[in-house]
């Protein structure tokens, strides 16, 4: 067989602008309502289908180069489901930290699906790509779509939302100890200890409440302004706050004093919104101005791991797949 083109894919990280946990489901997962936003911190993947059979993966950075890697699993699942013949060769350059709640593994899997869908003899429908992503992880479908996404169910039921303004995003997490990485299953287990599950009817009602809150809050993120203090815009004085905070935050903050310390530092830097992403360990602060964001990231880097990124709208996200020679 002739070799298919090699694809380079940007695997963008995500933050959760809000994450509400409704209940534990009979299948063991938790019912969620969340808003995910892709940001410019990203891994890079080069993907090629060659003569031969099987999957190979090489990695630059901190990630396993075997079948435990979600990118490998995505390639194997796509090759089987879409009858892709040949040897799928992957090279992953890893930049998104593990255990941060930034969706690094899920983003890599989504990037593999997006590229391999282009190599299939019969390109799968978008819904088929999303369905395959849902088999790999709850965040994968949202990271197939990119931009601003509403996630329901266990996160895999996804709906695209209008792009937000080009906010600057400062990420920070402690360098070690409790903040080095947080296991998502452990975070859910801690949440379960302190929160009895809702009835199905009550959980259903939270969808309407959450979506209503989203409609109230998101317009404020579409017009960034200079802020005077956390969560408040000076024009009109309306707070960017309506009950869409991250439900994991109290549990995570109890693990180490470093988490509330980072939260306070981002607030003092006049971030418009400060929250935990996913189940942690990273927190983010949103800034309208690049200079303020850069200053905040530099101050945090003295003691913590920090990154300065920007929101990635869906139009830019979709351009993140290119053919390389």
Image: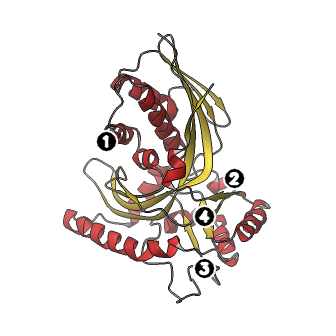
Q: Position of residue 152 (x, y in %)?
A: 33, 57
* Gap between marks 3 and 1 measured at Cα: 39 Å
Local SS, label 1: helix
**Between discs 3 and 1, the one toward the N terminus:** 1
- Look at 60% across and 64% down and name the residue there: 284
Q: Which mark is residue 230?
A: 3
Q: Please tell me which residue lies in front, 188 or 237.
A: 237
Residue holding disc 4: 284
Residue holding disc 1: 127
Up-down: is 170 above or below 270? above
Q: How crowded is mark 1: few (under 14 residues within 10 Å), some or many (20 or more)?
A: few
* Gap between marks 1 and 4 measured at Cα: 31 Å
Residue holding disc 2: 176
**Between discs 3 and 2, the one toward the N terminus:** 2
- Look at 63% across and 83% down and name the residue there: 229
> For this view, does 98 lie left or right of residue 159?
right
């Amino acid at each position: 067989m002739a070799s298919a083109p090699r694809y380079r894919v940007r695997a963008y990280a995500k933050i959760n602008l809000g994450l509400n946990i409704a209940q534990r489901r009979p299948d063991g997962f938790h019912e969620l309502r969340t808003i995910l936003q892709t940001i410019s911190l990203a891994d890079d993947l080069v993907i090629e289908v060659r003569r031969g059979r099987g999957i190979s993966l090489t990695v630059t950075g901190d990630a396993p180069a075997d079948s435990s890697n979600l990118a490998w699993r995505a390639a194997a699942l796509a090759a089987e489901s879409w009858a892709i013949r040949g040897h799928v060769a992957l090279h992953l350059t890893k930049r998104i930290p593990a255990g941060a709640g930034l969706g690094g593994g899920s983003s890599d899997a989504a990037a593999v699906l997006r590229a391999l869908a282009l190599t299939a003899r019969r390109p799968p429908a978008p819904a088929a790509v999303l369905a395959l992503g849902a088999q790999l992880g709850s965040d994968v479908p949202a990271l197939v779509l990119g931009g601003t996404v509403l996630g329901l169910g266990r996160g895999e039921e996804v709906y695209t939302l209008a792009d937000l303004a080009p906010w600057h995003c400062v990420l920070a997490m402690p360098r070690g100890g409790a903040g080095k990485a947080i296991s998502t299953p452990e975070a859910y287990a801690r949440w379960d200890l302190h929160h009895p599950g809702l009835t199905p009817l009550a959980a259903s009602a939270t969808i309407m409440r959450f979506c209503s809150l989203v409609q109230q809050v998101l317009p404020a993120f579409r017009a960034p302004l200079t802020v005077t203090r956390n969560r408040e815009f000076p024009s009109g004085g309306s707070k960017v706050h309506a009950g869409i905070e991250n439900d994991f935050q109290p549990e995570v903050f109890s693990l180490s004093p470093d988490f509330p310390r980072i939260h306070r530092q981002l607030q003092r830097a006049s971030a418009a919104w400060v929250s935990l992403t996913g189940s942690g360990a990273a927190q983010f602060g949103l800034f309208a101005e690049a200079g303020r964001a850069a200053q905040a990231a530099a101050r945090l880097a003295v003691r913590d791991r920090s990154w300065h990124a920007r929101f990635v709208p869906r139009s830019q996200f979709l351009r993140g797949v290119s053919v390389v020679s």
